[in-house]
Amino acid sequence: MYTNTNMATDNNQLIMEYMQKVAARHNFACLLHEKPFQGINGSGKHNNWSMTTNTGENLLNPGDTLQDNLQFLTFVTAFVEAVDRYPEMLRCTIATAGNDMRLGGSEAPPAILSIFLGEQLTAALESLETGAPIHAVSDLIMDLGIEAVPSFKIDNNDRNRTSPMAFTGNKFEFRMLGSNQSIAGPNIALNTMVAQVLREFADQLEGADNFEKALRRVLKNSIRNHKRVIFNGNNYTEHWLQEARKRGLPNLKSTPEAFANYCLDKNILLFENHNIYTGPELMARQEIHLSDYSETITIEARTMLTIAKREILPAALAYSQDIATGYAQKKMAGLEALTAIEDRLIQKLSQDCDELVADIDRLEMTLSENKDIANSQNRANHCHDTVIPAMKALRLVADRLESYVASRHWPFPIYEDILYYI
């Protein structure tokens, strides 16, 4: 069997590089950052995953015969079980500092791994599990009994754009990837975990006297034990967060939280069983990813400090000086009663500049603390728990200044201009 990922991975890397080169040729910059602007949709990738035989047959295509549909449901069930057993690893494969900024809203799925199957396919799996016939599911051709597998047409129009993983007719879409990352890591994980489940299916079916009966039993047990990961509703709601918690699904909201679960025993065993990675290699990769996260946050924080100290604060002070000059001129002209506007603006500017300086100092202090943390997990945790909140606080007061400092003083295009006018 093949998953056709090598060429797709290479092509994806080449197109990202080519986009940046073409943009530069035309004096543009191609941003592959997952969330460059607050308040608008981020930028991610949909990784379409399927399996084909060496003759080109897509194993995720439903067929017209009982045998074809049993085959199809076998591979769907294996995929569902794989996602339910290894959600922490899948979450790690898409965990980056940039991607953390978009997951959970603005057409990006949340951090909880779940699978959208749609009404028809969900009903078919329930029928396999319980043996009960399916009633009134649109476009499902019912030829059912306890031992029957339905013949059905799959609705390939996925209407649920909030789901991190969705079946879309003859493939699964993994929608959590960030725009800047390679698709190799997610596909290595998906290929390996599905291969592990299929190997276990094969071991259970080896030498079975009645293959079809044994297969139904294997699928029934798998669906019963792993159906908790199937969810066709709105993944953005508080109800789903509570429901996912009840089901025991992990909610690893940040990259440091995700990579704390990277080297779980089950993950090491998975990759060692298939000669993909050894335990020490996984630990080295964990170290690299955590260090990359911390360095990314540190670079962004230092850039923010440079902008705040060398651009925003001088602009606000220059505007304040302009207002103060007008205030003084009115007083000299005997128009002191008309200085109320200038007086309020000077006080507001003074307060916001004081807050800006305080937030600059706080961010510099958190970066100094972070530099002295040797352990990569602890350093990444500190970046997430302390550095990023300090960055957000500095951003708030800078945004406030942007909203009223005169445009002739402001050193950048304002946020609205960048998003809507330029």
Image: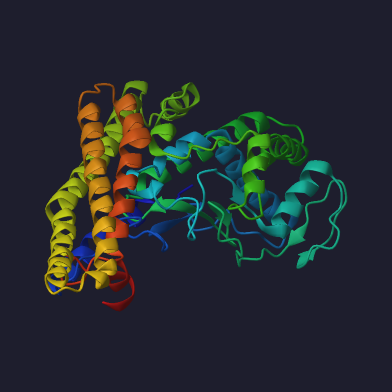
Instruction: Tell me where residue 354 appears, x and y as whole percent.
Output: 24, 47
Instruction: Tell me where residue 224 appears, x and y as whole percent.
Output: 73, 37
Q: How many marks?
A: 0
Q: Is 276 located above or below residue 99 in the figure?
A: above
Q: Is 158 located above or below residue 175 in the figure?
A: below
Q: Residue furthest front?
A: 334
Q: Is 109 located above or below residue 263 in the figure?
A: below
Instruction: Tell me where residue 69 appears, x and y as whole percent.
Output: 70, 54
Residue at (20% x, 36% y) in the render:
364
Instruction: Tell me where residue 98 appears, x and y as whole percent.
Output: 34, 49
**Residue toward you, 29 or 48:** 29
Instruction: Answer left or right for 189 relative to 73.
Output: left
Instruction: Answer left or right for 220 relative to 331.
Output: right
Residue at (78% x, 42% y) in the render:
129
Q: In the rendered view of the protein, which quadrant contains the C terminus?
A: bottom left
Residue at (63% x, 48% y) in the render:
238
**Residue toward you, 129 or 68:** 129
Instruction: Answer left or right for 232 relative to 94.
Output: right
Q: Is residue 221 visible?
A: yes
Q: Is residue 52 visible?
A: no
What color scheme is it?
Answer: rainbow
Q: Residue furthest bottom?
A: 421
Instruction: Answer left or right for 161 relative to 226.
Output: left
Quarter of the figure with residue 271: top left
